[in-house]
Image (cartoon, helix red, strand yellow):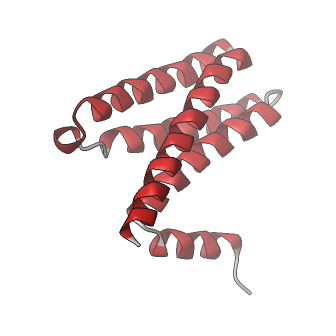
Amino acid sequence: MYSQQHYLAQQVETASPAQLVTMLYDGALAAITRARMKWDQPLEVNRELQRAQRILTELRVTLDYERGGEIAGNLGSLYVWMIDELIAANLDKDADRLDPVERTLKEIRAAWVEATHGNQAAAS
């Protein structure tokens, strides 16, 4: 019987680069959702918001500014802003600060999925 971690590891190992980015977006969104659900448990909130921050940091440091140009620069700025907002939400214990981060992340994810899905269809 496979564990959930084993299944996730298999998904990551077989995913395309575009799918990996989508998985990172999903992971950050899931961490924010878990933080909201555990808002009365400060240690859990801290753990989940830090998880989301690490994911956003990974997305930021893997941007290709040379090939991505202005788009990469804009994404990098958005990632930094979202990380800062997650830190502020955590420090201030202000769940409302998560709202714009979550909305922005969902919009970026949707655009990413549309762009990469379109590229996959064009390659077929």
Which quadrant of the view contains residue 80? top left
Vertical comparison of 98 with 4: above or below: above
x and y percentages locating residue 24 in the rendered image: 51, 50
Residue 20 visible in the picture: no
The number of numbered discs placed on residues in the rendered structure image is 0
Counting from the top left corner in percent of width and height, residue 120 is at 43, 64
State the image quarter where residue 40 is shown.
Answer: top right
Asked if residue 20 lies left or right of residue 93, the reply is left
Which of 64 and 96 lies nearest the eye of the viewer? 64
83 w.r.t. 8: above or below? above
Residue 124 x %, y %? 41, 73
Residue occupying the far left of the picture: 66
Residue, x 70% and y 82% (percent of image)?
2
Give the percent coordinates (x, y) of residue 19: 48, 61
Q: Residue at x 46, y 52 (%)?
A: 21
The quarter of the displayed image where residue 78 is located? top left
* Left or right: 42 in relation to 83: right
Task: Say if 116 sits above or below 66 in the image.
Answer: below
Is residue 106 visible to us here?
Answer: yes
For the N terminus, the quadrant is bottom right
Q: Residue at x 39, y 63 (%)?
A: 122
Q: Is residue 102 left or right of residue 121?
A: right
The residue at 46%/74% (across/down) is 13
